Image: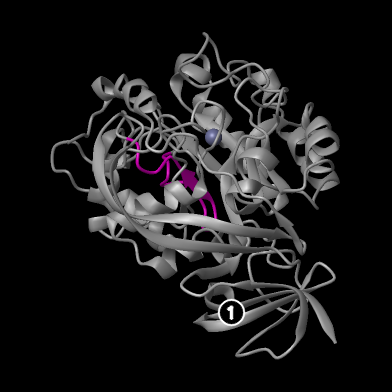
Amino acid sequence: MQVDTLIVHGRVIDPLNDVDKTLDVAIKDGKVFKVGENLNVAATETFDATGCLVTPGLIDAHVHCYEYATPISLNADKRCLSRGVTTVIDAGSSGASTFMGLRKYVMERSKTRVKCLLHIAMHGLASAGLSAGAGGGESDTLAILDEDSCVKCIQDNRDVIVGVKVRLSTDVCAMGKTEYEAYRRALNAAERCSVPLMTHHSMSTIPTQRALDPSAKLCCPGDLRPGDIYTHTYVGYPSTIVDAETRDVYSDVMDAKSRGVLFDVGHGAGGFNWTVAEIACKQNLYPDLLGTDLHVFSQDGPAYDLPSVMTKFLHIGMPLYDVVKSVTSAPALAYGITGETGSLTTGIAGDVTILKIDDCDFMLEDSVGQLRNIRRIIRHLAVWREGERIPVTFPKHLPSEESQQRSLKNLKDQEVKD
Ligand SMILES: [Zn+2]
């Protein structure tokens, strides 16, 4: 018996199987063949992972990779797979009328496993870049938010569409006029297909805490269902989850967490504020998912890549096991793809990532230009996708002074900051 790849002596963290132990991992014919102590098998390639972490291929719960079809999308193979990420979830770059391009030109041609959330707006993010970009947004016109088209597209592509996306921000919803209806339709579509809804909720007329607007018909995350996903959790913009006066996380947010609503980082270019994240984690609102919201405006900082976002949460004090869980088993469970990935179960795709934690000493920015002194960095050393070893790349500049300067422009708009 000969296997293709044998990874030896590493600390294997495989949360779906409740494993955190020094073990060997064998890959054969593109699949996980066996995980165990001192596997005595011949291998074409042996990788010595002494002093390293061996994890299931990382899953990024939130990226934008509909390259060239939307102004913000990047190339998943270049910016995700080479950074140790074997699976990405595109968060709403496409809608019902633009989805087939994502399927044919991105999903079917990428080495990275690409799944997606379908935007409730039929054109997805084809024209609207970021909420602060050119005037207007994808949900300005109610006719484009067609619930039936969204449902049909999901039902026809259940193998790759794993949820629904909506952005609740006044400036992408006709200055707030269509916001409630966009939310209502997105919730309905997700409910009808039994998939999660991910909400981007920032600078919104939909209240974070019901008491802030008792007449509001819907709240966010208050009206999300268990399994739905609240992204950009740690923004400091208006609609932040932290009460700017008391510096406490709103009780409706804590209630949502205990009901089973999932919280995603969604770092992006504007979605992560150190102050808010530190306050929230101190009050036990750690993220369930570490989505980077990686796109062309966050890939060279302030998000950089998934290992960099993992580094930030390790810095905040999130236990290493939970950091790994939030980029492996947790997103696999959230999006219903544990049959394909998210673990090192025998027979599953041979997607494996090697990580190493190194000492370091530099200042790292959030998306509003605030800095923290990072002393431990998580780096990706190697990655296999269906048994094939993929060369890794690293950010050109980490930290990037240019990104720190650029991010600083957002600081004046923060309700909560240092
Ligand atoms: Zn996003």
Q: Position of residue 111 (x, y in %)?
A: 77, 48
Name the residue nearer the viewer: 166 or 145.
Answer: 166
- Range covered by the magenta-colored residues: 219-235
Q: 228 above or below 12? A: above
161 to the left or right of 105: left
Q: Is residue 49 magenta?
A: no
Colour mode? one colour
Q: Position of residue 354 (x, y in %)?
A: 56, 64
Local packing at callout 1 (Cα closer than 10 Å; few below 14, some 14-19, many 20+) is few
Q: 287 above or below 297? A: below
The quadrant of the picture occupied by the N terminus is: bottom right
Q: Is residue 230 magenta?
A: yes
- Quarter of the image where ligand 1 sits: top right
The amino acid sitting under disc 1 is Asn
31 to the left or right of 285: right
Q: 297 above or below 232? A: above
Q: 256 above or below 45? A: above
Name the residue nearer the viewer: 344 or 403.
Answer: 403
Please say whether residue 48 is visible from this viewpoint: yes
Q: Position of residue 312 (x, y in %)?
A: 36, 49
Residue 109, picture quadrant: top right
Residue placed at 41% from the left, 38% from the top? 398
Residue placed at 41% from the left, 35% from the top? 271
Q: Main secondary structure of the magenta part?
A: loop
Q: Secondary structure at mark 1?
A: helix
Q: Which residue is mark 1?
A: 17
Name the residue nearer the viewer: 362 or 193.
Answer: 362
- Toward the left, the furthest residue is 246
Q: How many marks?
A: 1
The quadrant of the picture occupied by the C terminus is: top left
Q: Position of residue 64 (x, y in %)?
A: 62, 34
